[in-house]
């Protein structure tokens, strides 16, 4: 299939997936925050890191984790009203904001160096930050924006903070990575050529990167055995700033009154995220929707292993 036909098919497929899930999710139930991990008495305050935690699902995830007694470190790029709103939360020293551009792997590495010097454990790492339908652009490191943010930046965070996650898992029985992916992964393809330089369109770039993140999550769990837990999920179709590059009619449909009445709220989606963060028993390495394990789309294991090795090669060069 030519790249142009493939691009058209992906656009069509993404909107079909969005329509189907938009209907299905109306009947999803909000999971209850019971049977969840809680710190033992006398233990230090648990630590969570949330990327993209200043708006939408990330902000609500941050609030829920704060309510569960976590110290939350929010990693975000924004410097506007959203960040100011986060800073006004009455949570004292339980909330820590780090402004980092996730398109820069050097900036991410510097952040991890600071966190390694400051922390002795990280109990939960929520990789939530994302972009969607971003116009074609290469980052300063030479990678396509969707792949850089969704996969490489988050993989680097996990890789460099692995000792802190493993320590929390070993001592407190919770060291977990929750990767926020998307049901559009079913429209994606695993591509190794140039990590996104062979850009087709924003829809393909988004779906491909979300599939890559899910597959990387699965293989990372196999690589780490039981030293940490890694899961990924589709949190739902949620109106918000993520849709700023969507074509106008669909943006209005999703983010307008009809979308806000019919679709999931950021708080409902965040409950799914936090349940995966804190559930006592979990199927590590799996992909979840509404709290249940869902089979991955079929993919070539050889290509998947090549993706994992390519990501590891990039990380070792930073």
Image: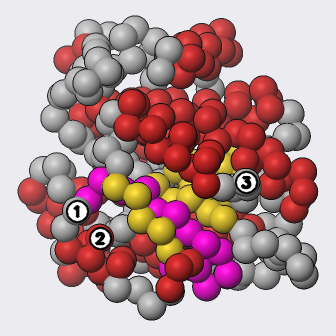
22 vs 251, left or right, is right
Which label's residue is closer to the chain start, 1 or 3?
1
| Residue pictured at 26% horizontal, 59% vertical | 78
Q: Residue at x 90, y 57 (%)?
A: 171
Q: Residue at x 61, y 13 (%)?
A: 309
Q: Between tags 2 and 3, which lies in front?
A: 3
Figure colour scheme = secondary structure
Q: Which residue is mark 3?
A: 120
156 vs 32, nearest the viewer = 156
Residue 159 visible here: yes
Q: Which mark is residue 83?
A: 2
Image location of residue 189, percent across then percent down: 45, 23
Toward the viewer: 143 or 241?
143
Magenta stretch contains residue 119: no
Where does the magenta region start and end?
Answer: 63-78
Give the SS element for disc 1.
loop
Label number found at residue 79: 1
Residue 253 seen in this snapshot = no
* Of the pair 143 and 181, the residue shown nearer to us: 143
Say which residue appears at 61% left-offset and 85% top-offset: 67
Q: Are circles 1 and 2 on residues that touch, CB within 8 Å?
A: yes
What crowding class fits label 2: few (fewer than 14 Cα within 10 Å), some (14-19), or many (20 or more)? some
Measured as percent of width and height from the top left, residue 80 is found at: 19, 67
């Amino acid at each position: 299939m030519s790249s142009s036909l493939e691009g058209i098919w992906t656009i069509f497929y993404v909107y079909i997936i969005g329509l189907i899930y938009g209907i299905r999710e109306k009947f999803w139930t909000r999971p209850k925050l019971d049977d969840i991990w809680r710190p033992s008495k006398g233990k230090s305050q648990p630590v969570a890191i949330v990327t993209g935690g200043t708006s939408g699902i990330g902000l609500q995830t941050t609030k829920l984790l704060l309510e569960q007694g976590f110290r939350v470190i929010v990693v975000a790029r924004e410097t506007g009203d959203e960040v100011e709103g986060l800073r006004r939360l009455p949570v004292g020293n339980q909330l820590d904001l780090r402004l980092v551009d996730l398109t820069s792997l050097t900036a991410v590495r510097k952040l991890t160096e600071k966190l390694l010097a400051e922390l002795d454990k990280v109990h939960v790492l929520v990789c939530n930050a994302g972009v969607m339908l971003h116009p074609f652009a290469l980052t300063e490191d030479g990678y396509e924006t969707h792949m850089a943010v969704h996969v490489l930046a988050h993989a680097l965070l996990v890789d460099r903070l692995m000792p802190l996650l493993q320590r929390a898992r070993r001592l407190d029985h919770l060291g977990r990575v929750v990767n926020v992916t998307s049901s559009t992964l079913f429209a994606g393809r695993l591509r190794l050529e140039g990590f996104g330089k062979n850009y087709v369109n924003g829809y393909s770039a988004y779906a491909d990167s979300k599939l890559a993140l899910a597959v990387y999550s699965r293989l990372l769990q196999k690589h780490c055995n039981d030293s940490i837990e890694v899961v990924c999920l589709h949190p739902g179709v949620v109106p918000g700033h993520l849709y700023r590059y969507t074509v106008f009619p669909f943006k209005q449909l999703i983010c307008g009154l009809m979308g806000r009445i019919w679709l999931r709220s950021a708080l409902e989606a965040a409950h799914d995220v936090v349940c995966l963060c804190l559930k006592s028993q979990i199927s590590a390495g799996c992909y979840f929707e509404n709290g249940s394990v869902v089979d991955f789309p079929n993919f070539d294991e050889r290509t998947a292993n090549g993706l994992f090795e390519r990501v590891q090669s990039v990380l070792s060069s930073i």
